[in-house]
Image (spheres, rainbow, N blue to C red):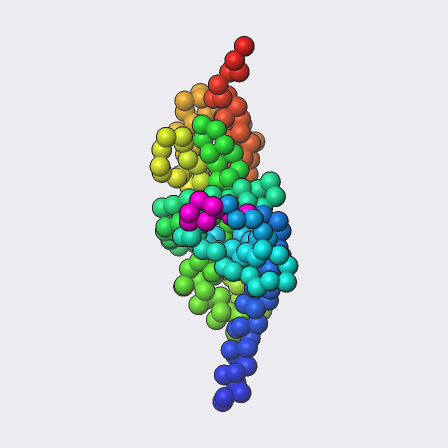
Amino acid sequence: MKKLIYLLLLIAVLPVVAKAAAKEKFLKGYYIDSLKNKVEGLIAFDGSDCQNFSFKKQLGEKSTVINVTKCSGFGIGPRVFEVIDDIDFVTLVRKRPITKAFAELIETGSVKLYKMSLELSSMDKTHKISSLALQTSGSSETGGLSSYLTKDRIYYYLKRTGENKYLRVETRKSKFKKQLQDYLKDRPEIAAKIAKNKDYSYNNIELIVHAYNEDTAPAPAN
């Protein structure tokens, strides 16, 4: 009986260990600490955990986990990540709130666009338990659900200059079109394209927001 329990625990833990090891790919970067100091070094961030990243000054040193509550943002090469707050993400059956999260800044301008990724099994206790149970069962029939629970999910958020609220972009076609038409209605030509042009879809949200910001950018001084 003890051997069986040990084996089940080992099966459950090994994927977690492998996942943790895969995260440790460090790249040159920096983060802004709670005192607004810029700390340069090496950062490992794979997008499965939107609230933590690993940091070390140089290779060979022990890494430190930096939590979203202790940092206002970080950068890896040209990529910039900021802290966004009071948002939610969606699973198959419900919305889940997040107080603070790291999200990549994709577009700047009148409307900022952020991209956040996470692994459901790392952010939600119910999904974590389900994922471990499926891994332990070893049944091939549960492969699809297990992949769903451990796959990194991507969510986009919009934030208008002067506002504090972040809007999660809907993925379903009908909801996306209505949502974006309403949000960008101050640019009728953009809203009209969202309504009629099939290329103006969720898959191209980054280009849509970029086009909107180009139209709203102030004209250069003569």
Measuring from the top left, give residue 19's x and y in whole percent. 57, 63
How many marks on residues? Answer: 0
**Rendered residue at 52%/49% (across/down):** 39
Against 145, residue 165 (above or below) is above
Against 106, residue 22 (above or below) is below
Against 156, residue 42 (above or below) is below
Measuring from the top left, give residue 176's x and y in whole percent. 45, 36
Measuring from the top left, give residue 35's x and y in whole percent. 42, 47
**Rendered residue at 48%/36% (across/down):** 113
Q: Is residue 44 visible?
A: no
Is 10 on the left or on the right of 99, as rendered? right
Quadrant of the rendered structure where residue 188 is?
Answer: top left
Q: Report if residue 218 lies within the magenta region.
A: no
**Rendered residue at 46%/34% (across/down):** 112
In-front residue for pair 16/204 = 16
User: Which residue is farthest top?
Assistant: 222
Measuring from the top left, give residue 175's x and y in whole percent. 42, 38
Is 115 on the left or on the right of 77, as rendered? left
In-front residue for pair 14/205 = 14
Q: Is residue 7 visible?
A: yes
**Rendered residue at 41%/24% (across/down):** 185
Q: Which residues are magenta?
A: 30-37
